[in-house]
Image (cartoon, rainbow, N blue to C red):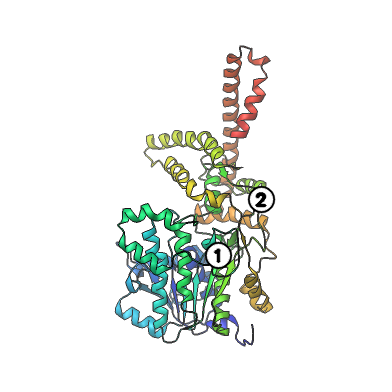
Amino acid sequence: MEGQTQTIPEFYKGKNIFITGATGFVGISLLEKILSDTPEHGNIYILVRPKKGQSIEDRLAVLKKNSVFETLLSQRATESVDQIFEKVIPVAGDVGQDNLGLSDSDLQTLKEKVNVIFHSAATLDFGDTLRTTIDINLLGTRRVTELAKQCRNLKVLIHVSSAYVNSFMLSTEEVLYPVTKDADELLKLAESLSGEQLEEKTPEILGEHPNTYTYTKQLAEYEVKKCEKLFPCTIVRPSMIVGAWKRPVPGWTISKNGPQGFILGASKGVIRRLPLGKDLIYDYIPVDVVVNTLMVAGYRAGVTRPEELAIYHCTSSTRMPFRWAEVENLVNSSLHKYPLISAVWWPRLKFVNSITYYRICSFFVHILPALILDNVTRLSGGRPILMKLHRNVNSSLGRLERFIFTEWEFKSAKTEELSNLLTEETRSKFYVDLSDLSWSDFFEKLVFGARIYLSKDPEKTLKAAKTKDKILLGAHICLKLGVISFIWFVLSRIFNVTMWRSPYFLLAGMAFEYLI
């Protein structure tokens, strides 16, 4: 990069790093990347929220066992786990509290030691109240920037935002767009209202924003903007983050959000319909590309020390567009190539192009089977969960409809420039370019990854799972024949013709095939 002499590992060499959101999908992937590819890093301070009955040391012990580190641990097999994580230091805190909930001693340590800050903590729930998202997404970012201002030797602040902060526009550039109300105005208003009053006024406050998440994340970017003259800082805006493309292993994921979540449900046979536009461009981005972009963007800002805030769209819509029509058949075949031993029915996923039609289909293929299976589970002493799952899905459809059936264009010229400025050797490790990404190959591996990492179904069960898959297929065919015969019989009686002479068998079969 312009005049730079350091490589990325050299830039992060010896630097003490502070990470918020380190136990989340992006944060834990970032931690793995730092440990793997910048081995001479300094201390890595991770903000960890204490849980009831679990200290931050306990939570770190659990974090070390996460599947994201399996490749790292195998590559450094001569070292103990404690040696590999020797410089990972948990600090008790919470972005939703004043001073990040840090003790005086921890706060002082961070001020004196920290050189690089990655801020990825946020609440991602589209249904959260405005007050909650203000406290975590907006004020949480302000609290991080206040800490950054006090760090004595800060080299760069990297803020994880979202490509959807400007979702009221269908095409966006890598720039800050004006807000209708600045943060202080919003905070003053929120303080003057009760919780109930604020809830009532939320739709008016949001304006064209679809939810409180995008609204508060947009305002949070301006908190980072205020710091651009004080120290190098940068913003990375990922779109919908999906499983890993290459690192730590293809298909790795611990997130049930987005495609990997419904692939998990489809592989169990309980999700059979999905509302989406097959020919729309959806914007998905692998988690390892997000992490690489964060590190490269931080490196660039730290080395070049620009006077203006740089923003990067970590997105695919303009670089490697994705349409579900391209992989629908492949996903279904992969569900049978990598079936689950825990499947409750033969998997088959179909896409429907409206929420209304989805609800109609869902009654037959989701709700009725869930009622039956939950009652069987209850009678056998188990815990029924299927109806709860489908209720949660149905209740969230209203919040998600805009995202399901809208096509956005996230322009990413600056992000492409990041890749072009990397050396060949650096580009192979810190890849941000998508030119050799095959969505078909990616989604086949994601189906396998969902099996291993979300369903916890090890590879050794695959043979038995394939046998079960054949049995479930036989049961599925028998059910279809039984239902078709019943519909055929009913229609024949209604129209007063004998079954064997009735043409309604074909109509019944076609209707049932389309629904089921």
CA distance separating discs 1 and 2:
22 Å
Q: Position of residue 379 (x, y in %)?
A: 38, 34
Q: Secondary structure at mark 2?
A: loop
Q: Nearer the viewer, residue 424 or 454?
A: 424
Residue 124 appears anywhere in the view: no
Disc 1 target residue: 238
Residue at image location 60% in from the left, 27% down from the top? 481
Quadrant that contains the N terminus? bottom right
Q: Does 129 sit above or below residue 436?
A: above
Image quadrant holding the C terminus, namely top right
Query: Which mark is first along the chain, 2 or 1?
Result: 1
What's the amino acid at mark 2?
A: Val
Location of residue 83 with respect to 368 vertically, above or below: below
Tell me what residue is drawn at x 66 percent, y 15 percent: 500
Mark 1 or mark 2, whichever is nearer to me:
1
- Mark 1, other Cα within 10 Å: few <14 / some 14–19 / many ≥20: many
Residue annotated with mark 2: 327
Q: Is residue 295 visible?
A: yes
Left or right: where does residue 484 sit relative to residue 79?
A: right
On screen, residue 509 above or below 72: above
Between residues 349 and 55, which one lies in front from this camera angle? 349
Give the structural element (helix, strand or loop) at label 1.
strand
Residue at x 40% of width, y 72% of height: 142
Q: Marks 2 and 1: in contact by CB < 8 Å?
A: no
Q: Would you place residue 384 above or below residue 66 in this image?
A: above
| Rendered image: mark on residue 83 | none
Q: In the image, residue 255 lies at what x, y percent?
A: 50, 58
On the image, the x and y values in percent for residue 361 come to: 55, 36
Q: Residue at position x 57%, y 18% from top?
A: 490
Frontmost residue, 273 versus 449? 273
